[in-house]
């Protein structure tokens, strides 16, 4: 396995964060969606192990992030976040606040049973992953534990073709702003979607429009004195 780092850019064009993604040395297929299916169906133990390895890599290359005030996000579900919090990694995470978590809230827990106390351990470091306006069914206490919500790419794409969907997404964005939660669009894969991101007023976007960094490039950028 190896890592790639997909950049997340603010709507004004400034680099804000990277999402750390694990890829297999032998590709599943040419379609990135296959990776999403693979990891969404993975066990919590497997996801926890991946997250711990990603944390270790990011800690070892933290100089690059710190010097540029860039966040690095890691994908977890609630059970893997709980496992990490109860392990020896918690102290390490406390010392490296630029490591953030993208949380899949669909797995493991019904919305009404979400462990809010766990989420509060990472206040200002949580991103609610793969959101669409119709699948938000969480209490205000749960939502306010998150600093960012990531709009699922399919919802973002549909909103560019359907006025009703666009209106619904804009309404959702305004609601998040009232809770001081920043909206990030996934699926910014071409100039058309980049311009749509700029018009949307969303906080940031992510997609294939911007090339990802390899783990080797991260190591090279991490050398002190490169900035």
Image: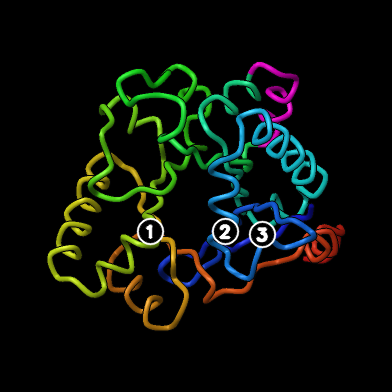
* CA distance separating discs 3 and 1: 19 Å
Single out the mark in the foreground, 3 or 2: 2
Q: From this viewpoint, which residue is outermost toward the front? A: 29
Classify residue 18 as left or right of residue 150: right
Mark 1 or mark 3, which is nearer the start of the sequence? Answer: 3
Single out the mark in the foreground, 2 or 1: 2
Q: Are marks 2 and 1 in contact (CB under 8 Å)?
A: no
Mark 1 or mark 2, which is nearer the start of the sequence? Answer: 2
Classify residue 2 as left or right of residue 157: right
* CA distance separating discs 2 and 1: 28 Å
Segment colored magenta? 86-96
Question: Quick one: SS at disc 1?
Answer: loop
- Determine the residue positioned at 53% across, 43% down: 40
In x, y percent, where is residue 123?
Answer: 47, 30
Single out the mark in the foreground, 3 or 1: 3
What numbered label is drawn on residue 203? 1
Estimate how packed mark 2 is, as few (under 14), some (14 to 19) or many (20 or more) residues with alpha carbons within 10 Å: few
What numbered label is drawn on residue 5? 3
The residue nearer to you, when weighing 33 against 206, is: 33
Q: Do the residues labelled 3 and 2 touch (CB within 8 Å)?
A: no
Report the residue marked by disc 2: 34
């Amino acid at each position: 396995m190896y890592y790639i780092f997909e950049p997340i850019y603010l709507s004004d064009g400034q680099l804000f964060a990277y999402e750390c993604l694990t890829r297999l040395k032998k590709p599943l297929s040419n379609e990135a969606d296959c990776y999403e299916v693979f990891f969404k169906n993975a066990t919590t133990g497997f996801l926890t192990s991946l997250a711990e390895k990603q944390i270790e890599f990011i800690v070892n290359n933290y100089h690059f992030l710190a010097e540029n005030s860039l966040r690095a996000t890691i994908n977890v579900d609630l059970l893997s976040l709980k496992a990490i919090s109860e392990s020896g990694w918690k102290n390490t995470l406390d010392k490296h606040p630029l490591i953030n978590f993208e949380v899949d809230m669909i797995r493991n827990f019904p919305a009404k049973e979400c462990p809010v106390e766990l989420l509060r351990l990472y206040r200002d470091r949580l991103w609610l992953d793969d959101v669409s306006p119709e699948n938000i069914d969480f209490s205000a206490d749960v939502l306010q534990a998150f600093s960012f919500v990531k709009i699922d790419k399919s919802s973002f794409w549909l909103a560019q073709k359907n006025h009703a969907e666009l209106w619904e997404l804009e309404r959702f964005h305004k609601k998040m702003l009232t809770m001081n939660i920043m909206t990030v669009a996934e699926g910014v894969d071409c100039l058309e979607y980049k311009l749509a991101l700029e018009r949307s007023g969303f906080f940031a976007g992510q997609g294939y429009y911007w090339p990802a960094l390899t783990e080797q490039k991260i190591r090279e950028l991490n050398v002190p004195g490169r900035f």
